Image (tube, coloured by chain):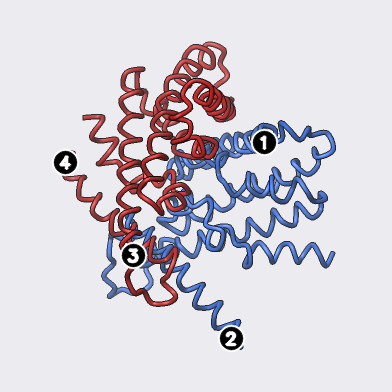
Chain colours: A blue, B red
Amino acid sequence: MRNFFKYVVNGIFKENPVLILMIGLCSVLAVSTSVENAIGMGLAFSFVMIFSNLFVSLLRPITPNEIRIPIFIIVIGTFTTIVDLVISAYFPELYKALGIFIPLIVVNCIIIGRAEAFAYRHSVLESVADGIGISLGYIWAIVALGLIREFLGNGTILGKVIFSGFDPAKVFTMPPGAFWGIGLLIGLLKWFEKRVSRR
Amino acid sequence: MLFISASLINNIVFMRFLALCPFVGMSTQIETSIGMGAAVTFVMVMASVVTFFIYYYILVPLNLLFLRTISFILVIAVLVQLVEMVIKKFLSSLYKAMGIYLPLITTNCAILGVTLLNINYGHNLIEAIVYSLGVSLGFTIALILLASIRDRLSYSEIPEFWKGYPIVFISAGLLALIFLGFQGLAH
């Protein structure tokens, strides 16, 4: 059980997929225009991440080594299709906002990377822990970016106005703001890490 | 018009945020950017054509639309392998130039993204080919631009915490701002 938490925490900070490993950036930058979209994308991603880790680990004894990558892709594709259909049926507005990035979860390098690097070599429980950790790491990165961009670009957080006298800079909800936001976040994380390790 | 729109106005990297992994990872040198761009162009056009036929002649008649994502990604993976084998056998000089980039392309989300967008926009076969050519040109331009900037950045003095990725993203943001200007072309 101790290991379980170790793997979870590992995904949140030390191996944060977005801010440290720099993979799976496409969806993070594209849908973080508002906090709401960011949360939706984070949950859709987590579902696919956790279940594909679980199934890759479960199927490990019967997976031939030579064709493991196509098998990973089929597992991930199955769960992506489930998420795609569920969101389009029950949350049509969110589906419109996330658009093409839901089917694109299937080529998200984070998921296939974890399947290959972790789930294929660890037990089921450990793989689920890793899936949860990586998902939480992804969610906090995308929500943080969503907060920065929605606040600076629109003056709101989750649709509520925070300061009435604040004049928002629209550019932050547009593509350039996404690049600046993520650059800022990575820089801050580096600075923070340095401060912590100096103590 | 479709070509210009795909390459400049809706640049795949700066406006649609696809293919960011190779954009950040491969843009360290100008030569590798060109190699990557060529490989992406090649695969993207082929993938657009093949998925076009699969979608309209297999999935639609059989009413299997929910298999779209899975079938497309498998087709792309097979296609990349096939292209790699053919080039290795018959065009070994070309293989040397872009061989190492080919396996990376399977997980390049721009390829799957473009094939899905072709379906979403209802492009016909010619439009799909023109669109994928435009997109890959846009991708190559973006890659070369960033590679040139990174070349210059390596000689400049940057505050410690901005070194590496943060400054790359800030530069990419400025490039995106410039590409935002192309939106005026649409009117």
Q: Chain of mark 4?
A: B
Camera-near label (3 vs 1) is 3
| Earlier residue among tags 1 and 2 | 1
Residue at left offset 57%, top offset 12%: B62
Say which residue label 1 marks.
A69
- What percent of the width, then of the height, locates residue B2? 25, 29
Residue at left offset 34%, top offset 57%: B172
Q: Quadrant of the N terminus of chain A?
A: bottom right
The residues bearing labels 4 and 2 have C-alpha atoms spaced at a distance of 52 Å
The residues bearing labels 4 and 3 have C-alpha atoms spaced at a distance of 30 Å
The residues bearing labels 4 and 1 have C-alpha atoms spaced at a distance of 43 Å
Say which residue label 4 marks.
B185
Q: Amino acid at mark 1?
A: Ile
The residues bearing labels 2 and 3 have C-alpha atoms spaced at a distance of 28 Å
In the rendered structure, find residue A167 and report the number of the disc placed on it.
none
Q: Residues within 10 Å of mark 2 (few under 14, many from 20)?
A: few
Q: Chain of mark 2?
A: A
Residue found farthest to the bottom:
A199
Q: Secondary structure at mark 3?
A: helix
Say which residue label 2 marks.
A198
Q: Nearer the viewer, residue A54 or B161?
A: B161
Say which residue label 3 marks.
B153
Marks 1 and 2 close (CB-CB < 8 Å): no
